Amino acid sequence: MSARKEWVEDLEYYPEAGCYVLRTMHDRSIGTQECLRSTSLQPHNQVQNFWDDGFELSHVTWLEDRWWVFAHRPADRKSKIQLIVFDGNYPEQDVADCIAQGKEIMYLHFSNNQWCLVANDDPMPLRGPGALYQEVFTFESFPADFLRDRVWRNEKVVKRIAFSGNLWVVVIGNGEDRNHKQELYIYSSWPGNVLLDIVGAGTTSIHSFHYDPNSKTYYLISERRTQHLNPADKPIINSVSVKISHAAPIERLREMGVSQ
């Protein structure tokens, strides 16, 4: 399969709105991407097979009674080793071990009553130059004040945020530079146009988008990066499109060349 410009960053179904949201990215470090659909309870083998074939996990979600496992082959393949955990309960000990042992959390997601944790199983230093900084916090409700007061005010960033329906998990790390900016938007109704407008403006990308049925609220985190500290520098924007549809976007995936 030849390299292409777009790859799937996120694909989710929001039943309260009856909409699928497909977010794609443009990243030259991504060579190819494939998708495998599986009805198995836990797609350990599928993810491991992708890894053995030189792919790394991009996104995994449960849609239309099956798992959709997206994996990409980096153009400049690095010898990362991935720790892959699927668990019906929040894998608290695995996450704690990652933090203590310097294993970077690459992916954390909840779908179909399963937590999926992917970490770099090749430990990084916790002190000194190039040290890994990451912390994980859990909350019973969306931590808006925590993000504003403890994360962004201290020039940290949200690396991953996941929601199980009764538990929010936030992984934070250092910003890549002082112009790595994230903002939180909260909506009480479907913000479909906002999703399209953020990407359409060409200056900001979507970091994460969640719906909490308990509070009937949507939480959107946007992201903006610039290469240096000069305000005139152009932002580094990876998101290239958001597609909202009432049916699974199979044709769009085919147009992108994602194998299934």
Image (cartoon, rainbow, N blue to C red):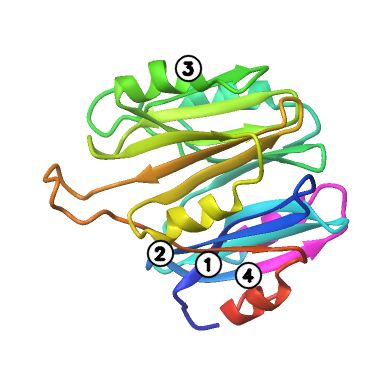
Residue 79 appears in the rendering: no
Which element is circle 3 on? helix
Number of numbered discs on residues: 4
- Tell me the mark number nearer the camera, choosing from 4 and 3: 3
Q: Earlier in the sequence, mark 1 or mark 3?
A: 1
Of the residues under marks 1 and 4, which one precedes in the sequence? 1
- What residue does disc 3 label? 146
In which quarter of the view is residue 90 placed? Answer: top right
In which image quadrant can residue 93 be found?
A: top right
- Considering the numbered disc 1 on the image, is that residue within a helix, a strand or a loop? strand
Mark 4 and mark 3 in contact? Answer it, CB < 8 Å. no
Tell me if residue 76 comes above or below residue 48 in the rendering. below
Q: Mark 3 is on which residue type?
A: Phe
**Can residue 60 be seen from the camera position used here?**
yes
Marks 2/3: CA–CA distance: 31 Å
Q: Which residue is mark 4?
A: 34
Q: CA distance from mark 1 to mark 3?
A: 32 Å
Instruction: Name the residue: 76% across, 32% down.
Output: 213
Q: Which residue is mark 1?
A: 7
Give the quarter of the figure containing the N terminus.
Answer: bottom right
The magenta stretch spans residue 164:
no
Q: 142 above or below 38?
A: above
Which of pointers 1 and 4 indicates the residue nearer the eye? Answer: 1
Query: Is the Cβ of the residue at disc 2 closer than 8 Å to that at disc 3?
Result: no
Q: Regarding mark 2 in the picture, which secondary structure is present there?
A: loop
In this rendering, which labeled residue sits more in front, label 2 or label 3?
3
Spatial separation of the CA atoms under disc 1 and disc 4: 9 Å
Q: Are marks 2 and 1 in contact (CB under 8 Å)?
A: yes
Name the residue carrying label 2: 27
Q: Earlier in the sequence, mark 2 or mark 1?
A: 1
State which region is magenta.
35-52
Image coords of residue 219 (percent x, y): 58, 35
